[in-house]
Amino acid sequence: MVQALTLEGRKQRAKFRAWHRGTREADFMIGGFFDRYHAAWGEEELGWFEALLEEDDVDVMAWALKTAPVPARFEGPLIEAMQRLDYVDIPR
């Protein structure tokens, strides 16, 4: 019998996926967003983020940079927080 992940287990999986996107730019944007906001997330917010992780990085980045319209299913306070980009800490 397969046991469902707890909320914390899902967050751990989401963190890994957020920081292993395939490009450094996407890692900083998506992983940085996760690190900044995930502690306050419940089921609904985590579900939104898990769905976002299924999207192509170029699309997510375009929505965050406001160079492409955000699909209705992702509209709301979480994408607005992502669009502020105040969570991206780029190592120098």
Image (cartoon, rainbow, N blue to C red):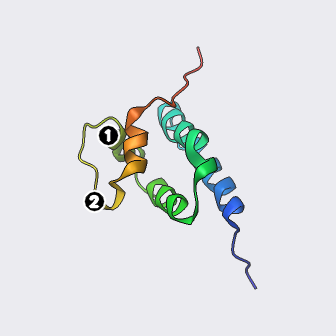
Viewer-proximal residue among 13 and 21:
13
- Badge 2 is on which residue? 72
* Residue at x 34%, y 46% (from the top left corner): 59
User: Measured from the top left, where is residue 40 in percent x and y?
Assistant: 60, 50
* In this picture, residue 28 sits left or right of residue 58: right
Kind of element beneath mark 1: helix
Q: Quadrant of the C terminus?
A: top right
> Does residue 1 appear in the picture of this structure?
yes
Whole-Å distance between the Cαs marked 1 and 2?
A: 15 Å
Nearest to N terminus: mark 1 or mark 2: 1
Q: Quadrant of the N terminus?
A: bottom right
Residue farthest toward the bottom in the current orientation of the protein:
1
- In the rendered image, the vertical position of residue 51 relative to residue 58, given as above or below: below
- Badge 1 is on which residue? 62
Kind of element beneath mark 2: helix
User: Measured from the top left, where is residue 12 in percent x and y?
Assistant: 69, 54
Q: Are marks 1 and 2 in contact (CB under 8 Å)?
A: no
Viewer-proximal residue among 25 and 40:
40
* Residue at x 58%, y 61% (from the top left corner): 42
Residue farthest toward the top in the current orientation of the protein:
92
User: Measured from the top left, where is residue 91 in percent x and y?
Assistant: 59, 19
User: Measured from the top left, where is residue 85 in percent x and y?
Assistant: 43, 31
* Residue at x 51%, y 31% (from the top left corner): 87
Q: Identify the amino acid type marked 2.
A: Ala
> Does residue 20 appear in the picture of this structure?
no
Query: Closer to the camera: disc 1 or disc 2?
Result: 2
Q: Identify the amino acid type marked 1.
A: Ala
Check disc 2: other Cα within 10 Å, few if <14, some if 14-19, many if 20+. few
- In the rendered image, the vertical position of residue 92 relative to residue 75, given as above or below: above
* Residue at x 48%, y 31% (from the top left corner): 25
